[in-house]
Image (cartoon, grey):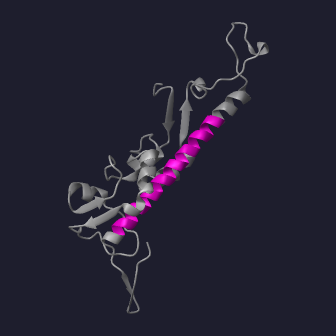
Amino acid sequence: MYPEELFVVGLPEGISLRRPNCFGIAKLRKILEASNSIQFVIKRPELLTEGVKEPITDSQERDSGDPLVDESLKRQGFQENYDARLSRIDIANTLREQVQDLFNKKYGEALGIKYPVQVPYKRIKSNPGSVIIEGLPPGIPFRKPCTFGSQNLERILAVADKIKFTVTRPFQGLIPKPEIRNGNSEAQDM
């Protein structure tokens, strides 16, 4: 497939077409805000039904001999593929969120905090040894959950109780401080 055959117009400036799970929250919000102006331009509609097999009857053939495919069958086959793909994407996104929540919880525990704390992936990567992560399945390195496929996410969740974060050198400014209200210390809402 070539870019001139299928492309998107109306995406916010600086955002190219990629899988949604590759974007952070800020970019996803920008995309949602611009959703009314986003359009898919399809120059060759047959690309949408590629790989979908449909029954062809004699009455559906043109004089030239090229088979015609009933539009409702095209849409039905496309819709089934689309629905199956959506459910796989939904499952993968749910798994990613679960692993993200797990990592945030474990990082919060490592800091001695009773609630989840957003994991500073970039700082951990650029400061090896500052946070030690133990218990991940063999062959799975520690990194952002959006970079894993469903199988690895499932493997991580299967050993969730064995995963442990140990902070050896805390990062300045990344530990949320409880808010003081009326002289009482209460955890700040996240």
Q: Is 161 on the left or on the right of 168, as rendered?
A: right
Decide whether residue 102 is among the magenta residues.
yes
User: Residue 182 location, x and y as percent?
Assistant: 41, 92
Examine the rendered structure and indicate whether residue 188 appears above or below residue 77: below
Foreground residue among 172 and 26: 172
Q: Residue furthest right?
A: 59
Residue 181 pos. (x, y %): 40, 88
Q: For the C terminus, which image quadrant?
A: bottom left
Tell me if residue 158 comes above or below residue 38 in the rendering.
Answer: below
Q: Residue at x 67, y 11 (%)?
A: 66
Q: Residue 137: in sight, yes or no?
A: yes
The quadrant holding residue 63 is top right
Q: Position of residue 59 (x, y in %)?
A: 79, 14
Q: Residue furthest bottom?
A: 183
The residue at the point 38 percent across, 47 percent down is: 147
Q: Main secondary structure of the magenta part?
A: helix
- Which stretch did the figure color magenta? 80-108
Q: In the image, what residue occupies the spot 41% across and 60% down? A: 160
Instruction: Please state the horizontal and vertical placement of residue 164, each as a whole percent of the image.
Output: 33, 64
Report whether residue 34 is seen: no
Residue at 62% x, 41% y: name it.
Answer: 83
- Residue 114 in the magenta stretch? The answer is no
Residue 156 or 97: which is nearer the viewer?
156
